[in-house]
Image (tube, helix red, strand yellow):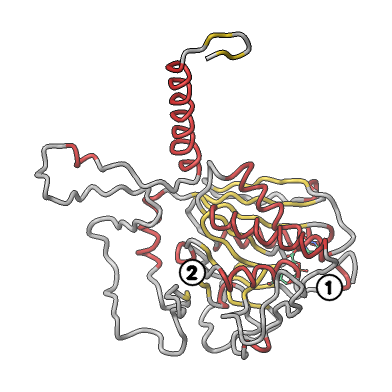
Amino acid sequence: MQMNGMNIKPVTVILLVLLLVGFYYYYYYYYYLSQYRFNVPPCPTSCSTSEPKDRVPDVIPTDYVFHLKTPDHLQYSQPSIVKGRTDVVAVTPWLAPIVWEGTFNPVLLDSIYKQKKINIAVTVFAVGKYIMFLKNFLETAEKHFFVSFNVHIYVFTDRPKEVPKVNMAPGRQLTVRSVPSSNRWQEISARRMELIQKLIEEQLRKHSDYIFCLDVDSQFHSRWGTESLGGLVAVIHPGYYLDDRGKFPYERRPESRAYVAHGEGDFYYCGGAFGGLLQEVFLLANTCRSNFEEDAKNGIEAAWQEESHLNRYMWINKPSKVLSPEYLWQDFKPRNPEVKTIRFSGVIKNYAAIRPNV
Ligand code: UD2
């Protein structure tokens, strides 16, 4: 074979092709998959020992994301399948759990996830005057959000110098990322998806397992922990869960990519809290961002910005865990009887005083 005057033998070409294919597979399996910590674990040690071949090993790998391994002899109250909460629904029609107080055992769940040594990232945006909410958010997170787990909070702000100093327990840390200011609150709210996507891509994928994206004008009141972990996690909006879906404030214009038709939709989810495994939230953020940008090209802004796109996404891509309105209540609303504990809530705010535009 002649190439640029060089005489290359077919066997050399075949060897080169094989080498390239080898490199590709090495990259795909060992770099691309492992960066998401999503690969099936290797065979446990006992597979290769002298144990009889037909005996199932009790040394079970702990890093496999869906494998729920408890410590032996863990003591906790006996579960029942006939006694439990009867005033709320604790499972969706697609069989995802809906998390309410009284539907889970925190001791059991914490023991399972402690062994996995999980890392949880949090994003919170405090742009313009919203910086005033950050101190309370961070202080209450210290008391109630994944206490005794590894938590890394990423604060996105245009006022890095005003980020308050808050004492954080070992294993917990805060990183500030500068973002530009904006004259439109709608843009600040909506651009979060793009920045979340970039953060996952550029920084998190080798260091975190789960991510939660939360509104800053909020505070924690009681435990928000391992019971909230799942592939794709959505929170039911406290304002609409007793309503017919015809009343949900979905985007109703068919021209928008956030469109949900009348008679469609499961629940109305909050834009102010969502999360899950990194790779799931990456897909969500990427999709919502590109749909938002496509709408913008066509001169459309969805009724509730990224919340509308998130609702459209969750209608098609069902969340694998749904958090009840305990996980995002509103301080101006009296607590409803089925809400036994408020874990996280939006604080009362004067929109006219804090937003850059009305
Ligand atoms: C709802 C949603 C919010 C978002 C919005 C629609 C809940 C509880 N809240 O809240 O997530 O979907 O509707 O756009 O579900 N921000 C700033 N600076 C600003 C304006 C906003 O940092 O000047 C950030 C901040 O993190 C804030 C978030 O954007 O928490 C959402 O803005 P909002 O709280 O004003 O939106 P709101 O109350 O209408």
Classify the position of ligand 1 by quadrant: top left, top right, bottom left or bottom right: bottom right
Q: Give me the disc on residue 351.
A: 1
Q: Residue at x 52, y 87 (%)?
A: 338
Residue at the left extreme, as displayed: 52
Q: Residue at x 59, y 56 (%)?
A: 283
Q: Residues within 10 Å of mark 2 (few under 14, many from 20)?
A: many
- The C terminus sits in image quarter: bottom right
| Amino acid under disc 1 | Tyr
Determine whether, in the image, residue 354 is placed left or right of residue 101.
Answer: right
Residue 286, percent across and down? 65, 55
Q: Give me the disc on residue 10.
A: none
Residue 330, percent across and down? 67, 78
- Which of 106 and 240 lies nearest the eye of the viewer? 240
Residue 322, percent across and down? 51, 72
Q: Residue at x 76, y 61 (%)?
A: 294
Determine whether, in the image, residue 213 is placed left or right of residue 306.
Answer: left
- Which of 167 and 96 lies nearest the eye of the viewer? 96
Element marked by disc 1: helix
Q: Earlier in the sequence, mark 1 or mark 2?
A: 2
Q: Is mark 1 within 8 Å of ligand 1?
A: yes
| Amino acid under disc 2 | Lys
Determine whether, in the image, residue 94 is placed left or right of residue 179.
Answer: left
Q: Give me the disc on residue 321.
A: 2
